[in-house]
Amino acid sequence: MKEFCIRVPQAQTGGPVIMTALIYAASKGYTPIMKTLLKQGSSVNARASDGSTALMWAARRGHLDIMDVLLAGGADPHATDDKGRTALDHALLTGHREAAEILEKTGAPAAR
Protein backbone atom coordinates (compact mmCIF):
# COMPACT_ATOMS: atom_id res chain seq x y z
CA MET A 1 0.00 0.00 0.00
CA LYS A 2 1.25 3.47 -0.80
CA GLU A 3 1.35 5.56 2.38
CA PHE A 4 -0.55 8.84 2.38
CA CYS A 5 1.36 11.57 4.26
CA ILE A 6 0.10 14.69 6.01
CA ARG A 7 2.05 17.82 6.95
CA VAL A 8 1.11 18.82 10.50
CA PRO A 9 2.24 22.08 12.15
CA GLN A 10 3.90 21.58 15.54
CA ALA A 11 3.90 24.50 17.96
CA GLN A 12 6.53 22.91 20.21
CA THR A 13 9.15 22.53 17.48
CA GLY A 14 8.26 25.51 15.35
CA GLY A 15 8.27 23.37 12.24
CA PRO A 16 5.90 20.92 10.62
CA VAL A 17 6.04 17.16 11.05
CA ILE A 18 5.21 15.04 8.04
CA MET A 19 3.39 11.89 9.12
CA THR A 20 1.44 9.04 7.60
CA ALA A 21 -2.34 8.97 7.80
CA LEU A 22 -2.03 6.10 10.32
CA ILE A 23 0.19 8.15 12.63
CA TYR A 24 -2.17 11.11 12.33
CA ALA A 25 -5.20 8.94 13.14
CA ALA A 26 -3.39 7.45 16.14
CA SER A 27 -2.37 10.89 17.39
CA LYS A 28 -5.94 12.17 17.23
CA GLY A 29 -7.59 9.11 18.75
CA TYR A 30 -9.42 8.14 15.57
CA THR A 31 -9.62 4.42 16.33
CA PRO A 32 -11.99 3.35 13.51
CA ILE A 33 -9.93 5.17 10.89
CA MET A 34 -6.71 3.73 12.26
CA LYS A 35 -8.12 0.19 12.22
CA THR A 36 -9.26 0.65 8.61
CA LEU A 37 -5.81 1.92 7.58
CA LEU A 38 -4.17 -1.09 9.24
CA LYS A 39 -6.56 -3.47 7.48
CA GLN A 40 -5.71 -1.76 4.18
CA GLY A 41 -2.00 -2.41 4.74
CA SER A 42 -0.60 0.72 6.36
CA SER A 43 2.69 0.05 8.10
CA VAL A 44 2.23 -0.12 11.87
CA ASN A 45 5.86 0.95 12.34
CA ALA A 46 5.99 3.75 9.75
CA ARG A 47 7.96 6.83 10.79
CA ALA A 48 7.07 10.52 10.69
CA SER A 49 9.69 13.03 9.58
CA ASP A 50 10.87 13.35 13.20
CA GLY A 51 11.27 9.58 13.54
CA SER A 52 8.13 9.19 15.67
CA THR A 53 5.71 6.30 15.25
CA ALA A 54 1.98 5.87 15.74
CA LEU A 55 2.67 4.13 19.05
CA MET A 56 4.70 7.11 20.27
CA TRP A 57 1.90 9.51 19.38
CA ALA A 58 -0.74 7.32 21.02
CA ALA A 59 1.41 7.09 24.17
CA ARG A 60 2.07 10.84 24.12
CA ARG A 61 -1.67 11.53 23.99
CA GLY A 62 -2.75 8.73 26.36
CA HIS A 63 -4.85 6.87 23.76
CA LEU A 64 -4.83 3.50 25.53
CA ASP A 65 -7.23 1.74 23.14
CA ILE A 66 -5.12 2.77 20.17
CA MET A 67 -1.96 1.60 21.91
CA ASP A 68 -3.56 -1.82 22.43
CA VAL A 69 -4.50 -2.09 18.74
CA LEU A 70 -1.03 -0.98 17.61
CA LEU A 71 0.80 -3.37 19.95
CA ALA A 72 -1.46 -6.25 18.90
CA GLY A 73 -0.67 -5.33 15.29
CA GLY A 74 3.08 -5.56 15.84
CA ALA A 75 4.07 -1.99 16.76
CA ASP A 76 7.66 -1.91 18.04
CA PRO A 77 7.79 -0.52 21.60
CA HIS A 78 11.60 -0.41 21.36
CA ALA A 79 11.66 2.05 18.43
CA THR A 80 13.23 5.44 19.06
CA ASP A 81 12.56 8.81 17.46
CA ASP A 82 15.21 11.23 16.19
CA LYS A 83 15.87 12.38 19.78
CA GLY A 84 16.35 8.82 21.03
CA ARG A 85 13.00 8.68 22.86
CA THR A 86 10.81 5.58 22.97
CA ALA A 87 7.02 5.40 23.27
CA LEU A 88 7.54 4.89 27.01
CA ASP A 89 9.51 8.14 27.17
CA HIS A 90 6.69 9.97 25.38
CA ALA A 91 4.14 8.60 27.86
CA LEU A 92 6.26 9.58 30.86
CA LEU A 93 7.09 13.05 29.48
CA THR A 94 3.40 13.85 29.09
CA GLY A 95 2.25 12.35 32.38
CA HIS A 96 0.27 9.43 30.94
CA ARG A 97 1.02 6.87 33.65
CA GLU A 98 -1.47 4.25 32.39
CA ALA A 99 0.12 4.40 28.94
CA ALA A 100 3.54 4.01 30.54
CA GLU A 101 2.35 0.97 32.49
CA ILE A 102 1.10 -0.71 29.31
CA LEU A 103 4.46 -0.12 27.65
CA GLU A 104 6.44 -1.28 30.69
CA LYS A 105 4.56 -4.61 30.52
CA THR A 106 5.89 -5.09 26.95
CA GLY A 107 9.45 -4.62 28.19
CA ALA A 108 9.73 -1.28 26.42
CA PRO A 109 12.83 0.64 27.44
CA ALA A 110 13.00 4.27 28.47
CA ALA A 111 15.92 6.37 27.26
CA ARG A 112 16.09 8.48 30.44
Image: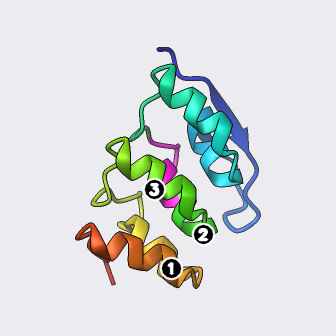
Disc 3 on helix, strand or loop?
Answer: helix
Q: Is residue 69 magenta?
A: no
Residue 26 located left or right of residue 111 = right
The image shows residue 52, relative to residue 102, as above or below, that is above
Disc 1 on helix, strand or loop?
Answer: helix
- Disc 1 + disc 2, Cβ < 8 Å: yes
Where is mark 2, residue-wise?
62
Of 12 and 104, nearer the camera is 104
For residue 78, what is the image quadrant? Answer: bottom left
| Secondary structure mostly taken by the magenta-highlighted segment of the chain | loop
Residue 18 located left or right of residue 83 = right
Q: Residue furthest top?
A: 1
Q: Is residue 20 visible?
A: no
At x 41%, y 58%, the residue is 82
Q: Which residues are magenta?
A: 47-56
At x 42%, y 38%, the residue is 44
Where is mark 3, residue-wise?
68
Mark earlier in primary sequence (3, 1): 3
Q: CA distance from mark 1 to mark 2?
A: 8 Å
**Amino acid type at image mark 3:** Asp
Expressed as whole percent of the image width and height from the top left, the position of residue 14 reads 73, 61
Where is mark 1, residue-wise?
98
Q: Is residue 52 magenta?
A: yes
